[in-house]
Image (cartoon, rainbow, N blue to C red):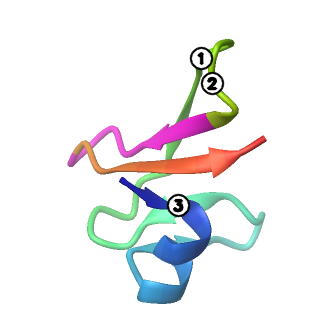
Amino acid sequence: MKSTRKGLRDGDLIKDTYERLNCAECDQVLKKENDPDEVFSVRICPECGSRFKELR
């Protein structure tokens, strides 16, 4: 699982005009999944299921 910063650099993610993270393939806004036991959040594309981790 890549980080969101690496996904932006590699072109897997893009930001829209409101600075929201979008999947580059599906052009869908990523959903956030928070696990209280982890240091990071998981960002998931609802269309293709790609997963990216994001430090809180």
- Mark sitting earlier along the chain (2/3): 3
Residue 8, image x, y percentages: 54, 78
Looking at the rendered structure, which numbered label has been put on residue 3?
A: 3
Residue that label 2 marks: 38
Check if mark 2's residue and mark 3's residue have beta carbons within 8 Å: no
Q: Secondary structure at mark 3?
A: strand
Which stretch appears magenta?
41-48
Q: Is residue 31 above or below residue 26?
A: above
Q: Going 63% across and 24% down the picture, which residue do you hit?
A: 38
Residue that label 1 marks: 35
**Mark 1 to mark 2 CA distance (whole Å):** 6 Å
Q: Secondary structure at mark 1?
A: loop
The mark lying in front, picked from 1 and 2, is 2
Nearest the eye: 39 or 19: 39
Residue 12, image x, y percentages: 38, 75
Q: Amino acid at mark 2?
A: Glu
Q: Secondary structure at mark 2?
A: loop
Check if mark 1's residue and mark 2's residue have beta carbons within 8 Å: yes
